[in-house]
Image (cartoon, grey):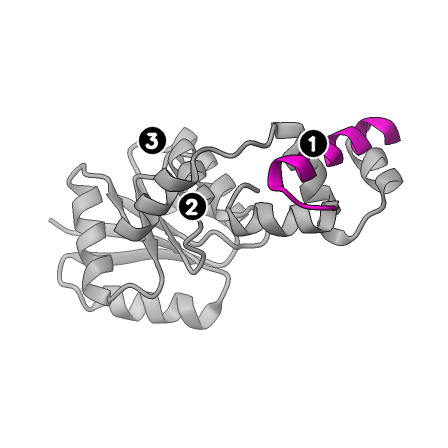
Amino acid sequence: MTTRLLLADDQELVREALCSLLSQEDDFEVVAAVGRGDEVASAASAHEPDVALLDIEMPGLDGLAAAAVLHEQRPDCRIIMLTTFGRAGYLRRAIEAGAVGFVVKDSPADVLADAIRRVRAGERVVDPALAVATLAAGESPLTARERDVLIAARSGASIAQIASRLYLSDGTVRNYVSAATTKTGTRNRIEALRVAEERGWL
């Protein structure tokens, strides 16, 4: 049984290397490869993959958002998140988005091939170290609005700019920032953003 694969990674060299590597397996066929998250759903519609391997950091849509769209439109396509970032919070969010596999990019080639075969067979496959870290870290303490405020702060935006972008008052944004810094044990929104990103909460 041949497994049809869709690859999504914004780094061309990585994408080409994965295509070459996986094409060497007799039971794999790479039917599509894209470099943006917002190209995933249309590529899946056109090529009908059995398994999609999605990087997390991509332009257009990040891999987690792309996974959610793909899962909604093609629930029969099994999704593996393939990423450099083995952050605990990412795993929880990937599962919520419909992913059934999570493999870090520095895994050996045979581990990735095995993961693809196992998810095609109906199993869930998660990097063991990441699974342990996720259980230890627990759920993100941030509310959806606190996450929005920290994400808006990524560009170095001021409180007023964040408020305008999110259609909130300056005072409301300050309250969300204060809550986020308290929950992350930090002193300001920049530090809170760093901690939240490191833990995969954004």
Residue 166 in which image quadrant = top right
- The segment highlighted magenta reads 167-187
* Magenta stretch contains residue 169: yes
Mark 2–mark 1 distance (CA, rounded to whole Å): 21 Å
The residue to which callout 1 is attached is: 179
Amino acid type at image mark 3:
Pro
The earlier-in-sequence mark between 2 and 3 is 3
The residue to which callout 2 is attached is: 88
Residue 17: % across, % down: 35, 71
Q: Nearer the viewer, residue 83 or 71?
A: 83
By secondary structure, the bulk of the magenta-drawn segment is best described as helix
The earlier-in-sequence mark between 1 and 3 is 3
- At x 23%, y 66%, the residue is 109
Amino acid type at image mark 1:
Ala
Amino acid type at image mark 2:
Ala
In the image, residue 55 above or below residue 69: below
Are dots 2 and 1 in contact, CB under 8 Å?
no
The residue to which callout 3 is attached is: 75
